[in-house]
Amino acid sequence: MIGKIRAEWDHLKEVAVHKPGMEMFFGLLNPKASLYERPFNRYKARNEHDLLVETLKEKFKVKVIRLDNEILGAADAHAEIRAELQRMALNSIGYVGSSKQVEAAKSALASQVQYYDSNHFLDMLIMRPIIDTRLGAARSAISSHIGVAPLSNLYFMRDQQMVSDAGIFIGSMSAQQRAHETELTSLLWKAIRAPIAGAAKRPATIEGGDFMPMGDFALIGRGSRTNALGIEQFLSSGSGYSEIAVVHRPRHPLIPSASIEPMIDMHLDTYLNIAGSSTAVGPSTLLKSASVDVYFRSSKGIYSKERTRQNLYNYLKGKGFNIIDISLAEQMSYATNFLCINDNMILAADASRNMPLVLKDLKGKADADPSTYGSLFNEMKREYSKMSPRDIFPNRAIGRDFGIDFEVIDVENLTGGYGGVHCMTAAISRS
C-alpha cells in the first residue's frame, strides 16, 4: 500500500523525488550556509538526477513521482488543493519595511493572484521570496529589490518524513534552512492521498534519515537532527513494530570530543544502511560507539524502554544480521547511503568517484581548523592511498560474499549537497 512500509529490504515499488531547480543555484552561492558539503556543478547535478530517475524506472521498474508534477497536477484538478497552494505560497513571502508598506505590498500582490498559474505559487514556496518594500516607498509599495530564502536541500526527499507500517509521519526539520520543507511535502502527500499517521510538533525535531523500518522492529537515530521529543511523538503515532531501537549518535573517534561537527554522521543512514534481510553495512567503529535504547510495544500499543543499554553493532548481531564493515573513508564518501531495491539488491552512489572530492574538501577544513579535522583528514588520506576502486564498497568482494548484488550510479555532484541515493529518494511503497 502506498505510504506504508514494513521493512527496508522489501521490494521497492514507488518513490518520490524532487529534481533540483533554481533553488540549488542560490544554494551554491554559499554552499556551507546552505548545508552543502562542497561546491559542485549544478548542470551536471541535474543531469545526474535525471539518470537516477531513469535508472529507477527503466532498470528496476520503480514508479517515480516528482513532487512538482504531483502537486501541480492536483492543484489544476482540485480547487481545494489550488487554494491551499496559493494560501501557503502567499504566506511564504517575507517582507521588510514598515507595517504600512508591508500591508500595501501584500494587498497589491493579493490583487494579482488570478493571473498566476499553479507553477507560480509552487515556485514561491520553493524560493521563498523576501520583498524589501522600503526601496520603492517613494513611488510604489512594491520594491524592485527582492531576495530569496530558498529550500536548497529539498531534493533530499528522504528527510521530511518517516514512512512506517502505520503510514507517513511528517517530520520536523532541525536546521533553519530546511524548516519549511515539510510544508511542501505535506501538500504532496495530500495530493496523492497517502495515509498520514501523525506529524511532529515543535520543539520536537525528527527527520527521515534517522528512521529505518526493519520488519518486526525499527531503528530511530537520535542526534543532531532528531531529538527525544520527536522520537516520543513518533512512538505515539500508532506504528505496530514490536520493538523500536533508539540509536544514540556516536562520537566520531577522529573528531575531538570538545569539537562540534554537525554533519559527518548527522543521520543514522550516514553511517548505517540495510542491504538485505540479513545484511547491514557500516563502519564497525561507529556502530560500536552508538548506544541503543530498546522500547517494547505493549498490547495497548504503548512503548516502554527497557533498562539495559547496548551498542548498535551487538544489537544488530543479536537480531541475526551480518555486518559488512567499511572504512571511515568509505562512510564519508556515501558508501552506506545506498537505496535498497529489494532483498540483497542495492542502488549505490559511486563512492570511488566521491572519495577524492570529499578528501579535497576535508583538506580545506583541516587546513582551516586542524584541531578538529586534522586527525580525520590524515586517516582518510592514509586509507585512500591504499585503495583502488575495487576496494571500495559496493565493489568490494565482501559484498558478493554476502550475496549482495548492486548497481552503481554516478551522482558525484548531487552528493556535494551532503547526501547519497538514500537521502535523495523517499520510498513510499514496498511489498
Image (spheres, rainbow, N blue to C red):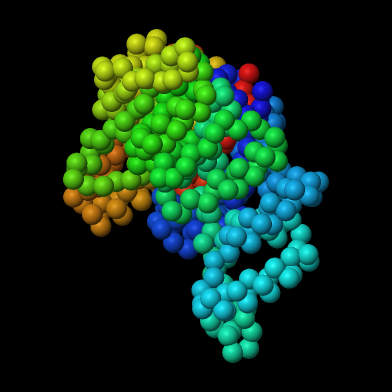
Tell whether 82 sits left or right of 340: right
* Picture quadrant where residue 86 is located: bottom right
The spot of residue 261 in percent (x, y) is: 29, 46
Quadrant for the N terminus in the image: top right
Q: Residue furthest bottom?
A: 138
Tell whether 340 sits left or right of 292: right
Between 348 and 85, the one lying in front of the other is 85
* Picture quadrant where residue 195 is located: top right
Between 143 and 289, the one lying in front of the other is 143
Tell whether 199 sits left or right of 12: left
Tell whether 76 sits left or right of 408: right
The spot of residue 286 in percent (x, y) is: 29, 29
Q: Residue at x 41, y 31 (%)?
A: 232
Between 228 and 257, the one lying in front of the other is 228
Marks counted in the figure total 0
The spot of residue 56 in percent (x, y) is: 64, 32
Q: Residue at x 41, y 41 (%)?
A: 204
Q: Residue at x 34, y 11 (%)?
A: 318
Q: Is residue 359 above or below residue 192?
A: below
Between 348 and 162, the one lying in front of the other is 162
Q: Residue furthest front?
A: 300
Q: Is residue 142 above or below residue 298?
A: below
Looking at the image, can residue 149 be seen?
A: yes
Q: Residue furthest right?
A: 77
Quadrant for the C terminus in the image: top right
* Picture quadrant where residue 125 is located: bottom right
The spot of residue 321 in percent (x, y) is: 40, 13
Q: Residue at x 31, y 23 (%)?
A: 292
Q: Is residue 223 above or below residue 90?
A: above
Looking at the image, can residue 280 be seen?
A: no
